[in-house]
Image: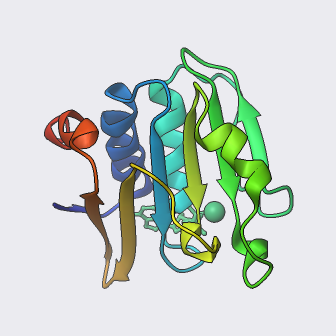
Amino acid sequence: MEYFTKTVEETIKLGEMIGDSLFPGAIITLNGDLGAGKTTLTKGIAKALGVKRIVNSPTFTILKIYEGKLTLYHMDVYRLDGIGYDYDLEEYLYGEGVSVVEWSDNIKGSIDEHLRIDIYQEDGQRKFILSTNSKKYDPVMRGIK
Ligand code: ADP
Ligand code: MG
């Protein structure tokens, strides 16, 4: 499905709608150029999960952990490009929290069942394309109004 936003606030709202129907072990992958809105969307997801701390880009840390109704693992694997698959991340990806992975295409090897969001910058708006390889995420898609 496609979704369009014109402002940061609308992108955060989209993130909240997604975050509202996430469940333990959920994985969201975000791909799109620098400045596309991956971290902004993650802020909305974090808000829905009841995270109180400010979520910002983990570009220099790979992983940040936020406590909420569910634990949020916010990963930015931009720097893993070409290094190979990082097996350490699996412990988080397939754990009980919610994982949001910016630049997941930079991970060599595939991620199991997940919701994939590709973000494109268009004139005056952002286009979000949501797709999934698992029925588990159908309720998440249906929760977007
Ligand atoms: P990424 O994590 O993909 O690099 P960020 O979310 O950190 O991107 O940054 C997005 C940038 O684009 C911010 O500077 C934000 O103000 C700007 N922006 C403009 N329009 C939008 C929109 N509709 N949604 C999200 N961000 C937007
Ligand atoms: Mg980012």
Q: Is residue 37 visible?
A: no
Residue situated furthest top in the rendering = 69
Q: Seen in the image, is 59 located left or right of residue 144?
A: right
| Quadrant where the N terminus is found in the figure | bottom left
On the image, the x and y values in percent for residue 90 come to 67, 47
Q: Seen in the image, is 115 located left or right of residue 130?
A: right
Pick whichever, 68 or 4, lies toward us.
68
Q: Seen in the image, is 132 located left or right of residue 68?
A: left
Q: Is residue 33 above or below residue 13?
A: below
Report the label total: 0
| Quadrant where the C terminus is found in the figure | top left
On the image, the x and y values in percent for residue 28 come to 46, 49
Q: Is residue 19 visible?
A: yes
Residue 92, located in which quarter of the rendered image?
Answer: top right
Pick whichever, 134 or 75, lies toward us.
134
Q: Is residue 118 above or below residue 21?
A: below
Query: Residue at 54% of width from left, 14% of height from top?
Result: 69
Query: Residue at 61% of width from left, 24% of height from top?
Result: 51
On the image, the x and y values in percent for residue 116 come to 37, 59
What's the coloring here? Answer: rainbow
Residue 79, located in which quarter of the rendered image?
Answer: bottom right
Q: Is residue 73 above or below residue 86?
A: above
Query: Residue at 34% of width from left, 38% of height from top?
Result: 18
